[in-house]
Amino acid sequence: MNVHSAPVPPPGCPAHDPGGRVPLYGPDFAADPQAYYDYLRHYGPTAPVELAPGVEATLVTDYTAALNLLRDPAFRKDARQWRDLHSGKVPEDSPVVPLLAYRPNCMFADGAEHQRLRQAVTESMTRIDSRHLAQITEQVSAYLIAQFSARGSADLMADYAGQLPLFVFNELFGCPAEIGDRVLFGISGMFDGVNAAESAQLLHGAVGELVSLKRDRPGDDVTSWLMEHEADLTDDEMVHQLSLLLGAGAEPLRNLIGNTLHRVLTHDRGAYQDVRNAINDTLWKNPPIANFAAHYPADDRMYAGRQVSAGQLMMVSFAAANTGMAQTEDHHAANRASLAWSAGPHACPSQRPATGITVTAVDNLLGRLPDIELAVPAHLLTWRPGPFHRALSALPVRFGAVQAVGRPTAPVSPQHTTTRAEHPAEQRRAGGPGKWTQFLAWLRK
Ligand code: HEM
């Protein structure tokens, strides 16, 4: 759709009916979200959308209006104020409720409580050593590539981008083998939507055990640093902040790696000699979290020229705000930051490690499989439906088969080598070695 033409709703959009809300779900939206954003801009800085059947929201599509909302304490993050959920208007079993409903973590906290939880998170993430992070990412990358390199083909979402962040997190959080297996299994199940409730329970249980373990035997890891922090988190608070870090981290990171690989593979390779440029362009033009940052006005008020009411759901379209800005000025020259990480007090606290992991993951893959290319024409690639994440369903590639992928020689953390043997009952319950155990065995070969 041409941005300069008169606004016409994209094909399939019920906004063809006057008064209709624009749906941010379904195959038409997934196929061409930019056409939707171009259309939504004709409403002005905010537009009426539907996130799922029966779930209404006001979407901010303008860069400056988005910054104003993200920085204004009159817009709250506490989802217990979400009027339509509590009035019963939003169907309880709506697919968007699990991500938007309140949990006691820093993403849903405001004011002093937010500061306390957020500081614990930020200061613990800051302690991650970037050399150690690059080392572990390289090890995980080499291991995952070794699983498919002899085939000469792979789906980079399922075989690489989807798995790499989870393995890296297991290391950063100091997960011993068996707990790490259940964390991997639980998160993957939640994202795949297979037995989502059961998987969430499994994850919660595994993280709870990790917390008890680290209370007894702290290590040099994010879990122990969070625990040591002066915020003095209770066990319950620990479990919720750790689950947030795993949940808020794994899905966008997989998509930052996936969308960056997609950019490199669909452009002239010479344009992206430096992978940081590919990441930067991805953050501007195809951000992994396209629409999020749910906020609720504390009271009825005027915002961006419109009346908004207390407890109404407002979301920010990072994708629309970025592309709108890129169309109106030279954003690189103007040095305005992309909104892909959000802004204000709830901006992503993990930009540095997330970028570091992505650089290593992409560089290592392209370095080890230099002739890698898409296995299907780019226009046949499909994207997962849903309003929040910009995520490829699959990224099929082919390359000259490689028999042996070298294993980096960095040492395995001692905590991984000892704890498994101390939990034989857990090992039996898990039904044999899981993915994390197999990775640790590969490292020790
Ligand atoms: C190491 C991986 C990551 C971790 C551990 C992580 C963690 C978090 C946490 C804890 C928050 C909530 C902060 C708060 O409410 O004060 C957050 C927010 C956010 N993160 Fe990340 N993140 C990661 C990667 C990413 C990536 C790759 C992106 C996309 C480029 C991203 C984009 C965002 C955005 C847009 C928000 C604001 C969400 C909102 O306000 O609703 N994050 N992240």
Image (tube, grey):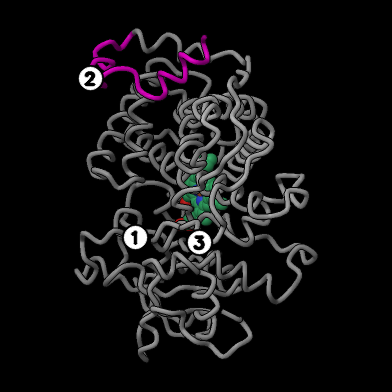
From the viewer's side, name the closer residue of 150 and 39: 150
Report the residue marked by disc 2.
Answer: 429
Q: In the image, 204: left or right of 92?
A: right
Front of the two marks 1 and 2: 2
Distance between the alpha carbons at the discs numbered 2 and 3 = 39 Å
Q: In the image, 320: left or right of 131?
A: left
Which badge, 1 or 2, comes first in the chain's sequence? 1
**Majority secondary structure of magenta residues:** helix
Report the residue marked by disc 1.
Answer: 79
Which disc number belongs to residue 228?
none
Q: Amino acid at mark 2?
A: Arg
Q: Quadrant of residue 412?
A: top right
Q: Amino acid at mark 1?
A: Ala
Q: In the image, 116: left or right of 339?
A: left
Return the x and y of residue 81 as percentages of the image width and height: 32, 65
The magenta segment is: 422-445
For the point 40% across and 25% down, the residue is: 435
Q: Secondary structure at mark 3?
A: loop
